[in-house]
Amino acid sequence: MDEVLLRTLTPTVIGILVRRGADFAAAEDAVQDALVEAVRGWPDDPPRDPKGWLVAVAWRKFLDAARADTSRRRREVRAEVEPMPGPSEVADDTLQLYFLCAHPSLTPASAVALTLRAVGGLTTRQIAQAYLVPEATMAQRISRAKRTVSGVRFTEPGDVATVLRVLYLVFNEGYSGDVDLAAEAIRLTRELAARTDHEEVAGLLALMLLHHARRAARTGPDGRLVPLAEQDRSRWDTRLIAEGVDVLQRALARDRLGEFQAQAAVAALHADAPTVEETDWVQIVEWYDELVRLTDSPVARLNRAVAVGEADGPRAGLAALARLDPALPRYAAVAAYLRERDGDLVAAARLYADAARSAPSLAERDHLTRQAARLNARLRGQR
């Protein structure tokens, strides 16, 4: 096997696929798949035209992936915007593919990344944002995962915990990102809940339902992001909230707390408050304490700082925030909010502008920019 030849041909073959109509990321993935086949097959049966062979196989891989993506999107279109309660009635092999990609030969992080790319339909950039790592790092991780599983037989499926992590990230991207995958993630989690008696599966399903219940209120008529505190709660789906709370209560009754149950408990407390002023922030802080204990997640600590600021005042929230890394995504946005509540409008306006520059989505950037403009206008009026 001439590995130097393969490395030399790779950019050329990617360029050919791009000229044929594939976008760069899809072309790169297809060529990686073709290289895996080359590594497996060329030592015993080398082609007479290596470049032609790679182009043909990579183009076939691209077309197969494009057809699979089209089929997945058709399933999403058929799915209702608001998922029906109860177990899933439509069964397909998607959930099985999730388990197969979560192969025991892979680390959990690599299995999640591979599944999100190969089955979930997320781009490498979207996955990198979810993992808080550079896009190039995630691309290398996915490529290594593909190479790892290229020579194994998919007879031993992965574990439930890894599949739950994938479904959680798919839902988050569908809920807040550019691709609408939330309903599909809920459908698959319902199907998983019907197949397995696992309290964290129930916890994840409850979390998804409670977040999805607020979907209609998350954006205004002009498409602008509406923060939780400003949402019209009459637009929340009470049917989904009731189902989510019921699923969560049954999971918590088993007394085997996990991170998804803790997150769902926070979401349930928000859903239970008739107004933002009636939110039980003290109990929310307690649930974030549990979540930090379970995960030691910097994101959980960041959200806890917000809750502490609501329960004990903005200075207490800023003290909790000071213990975190300022490079953490959305750190500046949280600092801006707490500074504004503490009366430091100059610092808050600057921090909102800083947060807008690093916002992960256009809607969030627009919201933070408007927050900075609002405070700057207020400061000019005070002069």
Image (cartoon, rainbow, N blue to C red):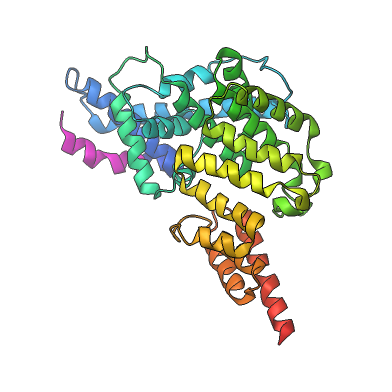
Residue pictured at 37% horizontal, 33% vertical = 110
Q: Position of residue 236 (x, y in %)?
A: 78, 40
> Extreme bottom residue here?
383
Q: Is residue 234 above or below residue 377?
A: above
Q: Position of residue 211 (x, y in %)?
A: 67, 38
The answer to whether residue 8 is magenta is yes
Between 354 and 35, the residue placed more toward the observer is 354
Q: Is residue 290 left or right of residue 349?
A: left
Residue 145 image-quadrant placement: top left
Q: Is residue 44 above or below residue 4?
A: above
Q: Is residue 28 left or right of residue 86?
A: left
Residue pictured at 56% horizontal, 22% vertical = 199
Residue 55 in sight here: no
Q: Main secondary structure of the magenta part?
A: helix
- The C terminus - image quarter: bottom right
Residue range in magenta is 1-15
Residue 183 image-quadrant placement: top right
Q: Is residue 69 above or below residue 141?
A: above
Q: Position of residue 276 (x, y in %)?
A: 76, 51
